Amino acid sequence: MLIRITTSRLTATLTTLAAAGGLVFATAVPSQAAEVGLSQETGLNTYVRAELENQSLQTGAAALASAGLDSVSLSATTPAPVASPAAAVDQVVRTAGASSASADQTAAQVSKGTARAQVVVGSSIMATASQFIGYPYVSGGNRPETGFDCSGLVQYVYGLHGISLPRTDSAQKAAGTVITEAEAQPGDLVWWPGHIGFYAGNHQVLDAGNERVGVSQRAIWGSPTFVRI
């Protein structure tokens, strides 16, 4: 806080005139104005500071009058606090950096083909599909009463678990997400062009293969595509 004192007769050195309530006078120039520094106690609330400043101004005025100064004008100006934006900017930068890192991590996982969770627990799918081992292969079949072809068996089993799939093997593949064999779990699908079955684990497939083998579980051959519904 800065106190400005104006007087018409200040011609001599003015040393410490008063030190009450935190008011300190320390100027010594023969002129029409003197600068007076007012120290403020930090930690006081606004009301207490205002009271101290008022008392200090009154004490200073009385001290100047007793020194024979016939014209005294005191004015106090407290500059409004200016909040530094540095902390807020730093927080924004840190938040943006964290978001960017999270996005990069997600992108990296996607690029590596990280598989999402199965919509139905795979062991439940396999438990249902296993009940039809030994049923005949019938082209176009999609019910136990008639027998199954490959996509008919997949559609029927997933349907028993509340998942509606298209009828053909290529459409069933398109309805899911391609994964690696390392990511595949029992209940996922194994697809070859024109054929599809259930991944049974341990490099095995459960499928309605052909009229000779019917619905069976057997070793995977070739290089199929693994799909998660």
Image (tube, rainbow, N blue to C red):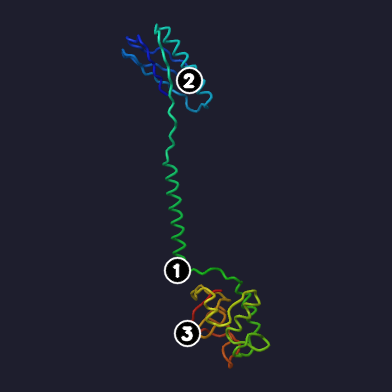
Q: Is residue 10 above or below residue 207?
A: above
Q: Residue at x 47, y 24 (%)?
A: 41
Distance between the alpha carbons at the discs numbered 2 and 1:
69 Å
Is residue 52 found left or right of 124 in the rendered image? left
Distance between the alpha carbons at the discs numbered 1 and 3:
23 Å
N-term-proximal mark, 2 vs 3: 2
> Which part of the image, by quadrant, shows the C terminus?
bottom right
Residue occupied by mark 3:
222
Q: Could you say which quadrant of the image residue 63 lies in? A: top left
At label 2, which amino acid type do we have?
Answer: Glu
Crowdedness of circle 2 by 10 Å Cα count: few (<14), some, many (20+)? some
Residue occupied by mark 2:
53
The residue nearer to you, when weighing 171 against 195, is 171
At label 3, which amino acid type do we have?
Answer: Gly
Q: Residue at x 36, y 10 (%)?
A: 8
Residue 13 x/y as whole percent: 33, 11
The answer to whether the residues at label 2 and label 1 have Cβ atoms under 8 Å apart is: no
Check residue 7 in the rendering and tell me which mark sits there, or answer none.
none
Which structural element holds mark 2? helix
The residue nearer to you, when weighing 43 against 61, is 61
The answer to whether the residues at label 2 and label 3 have Cβ atoms under 8 Å apart is: no
Residue 31 x/y as whole percent: 32, 14
Q: Could you say which quadrant of the image residue 211 lies in? A: bottom right
Residue 121 x/y as whole percent: 61, 72
Which structural element holds mark 3? loop
Check residue 112 in the rendering and tell me which mark sits there, or answer none.
1
The residue nearer to you, when weighing 174 against 25, is 174
Q: How many marks?
A: 3
Q: Nearer the viewer, mark 2 or mark 1?
A: 2
At label 1, which amino acid type do we have?
Answer: Lys
